[in-house]
Image (cartoon, rainbow, N blue to C red):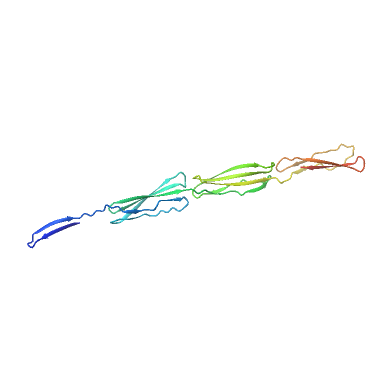
Amino acid sequence: ITRAFTATDDCGNTTSATQTITIIDTTAPELTIPADYTAECSDAHPMDDASATDNCGEVTIDVVETTIDGECAGDYTITRAFTATDDCGNATSATQTITIIDTTAPELTIPADYTAECSDAHPMDDASATDNCGEVTIDVVETTIAGACAGDYSITRVFTATDDCGNATSSTQTITIIDTTAPEFTSVPSDYTASCDDDLALDDASATDNCGIVIITVEEVTAIGSVPGAFTITRTCTA
């Protein structure tokens, strides 16, 4: 602003002088940005706007977003560099940091426990899992625990689902194998009648089992008949 002053007396004599007022804008805008925050990778990640005021004019706000990878898919950082600039080029900058984390373990679904006869089918179904932010790897460790006999035992299957960030969930399926099926005789010697002076054929019985070895025991009982030389032998075979 220039102010030209002129002083004039009654006779028209004048003197002039000039005042110069220089107006400047060296004050940067006042910038308000969203607060830093930390959030789970599966949560909402609000990207709120910044605001700014200036002492003398309009303000333009620019933002530059940068994503910095972490050690796994669900861990990373977002930086948001805001810059508020007024009409005269005065600028203020500030950075918001958003930290994204993955601390949630996968959800694991495993096959149900069951009990089965040793000769039945023993399905070894797979487990399944889902994760809130990434891929899942499922490992299984099977352990067989012997029972009192060959056909009785149990199998434990420990499933572990692990996501990219190392969060893990474990669960155990127990399969109980039992043997409640008796052996089947494949042959038993037939009853017969013989003369007292004949050689007696005491043949063996045979049997098979659905799950193991079969032991056959024979219990013989002799009953004396009503006349000399007459008797009955009863042979009870147990498999």
Expressed as whole percent of the image width and height from the top left, the position of residue 120 reads 67, 46
In the image: residue 3, left or right of residue 203: left
Q: Is residue 219 visible?
A: yes
**Residue 125 in sight in this render:** no
- Nearer to us in this view, 29 or 204: 29
Q: Residue at x 41, y 48 (%)?
A: 78
Query: In which quadrant will I find the N terminus?
Result: bottom left
Q: Left or right: where does residue 46 sit relative to residue 89?
A: right
| Image: 14 above or below 166 | below
Q: Which of 221 and 192 lies nearest the eye of the viewer?
A: 221
Residue located 31% across and 51% down the image: 91
Q: Which quadrant of the figure has residue 230?
A: top right
Residue 32's x, y, as percent? 35, 54
The extreme left residue here reads: 11
Q: Position of residue 94 (x, y in %)?
A: 35, 50
Position in image of residue 65 (x %, y %): 39, 49
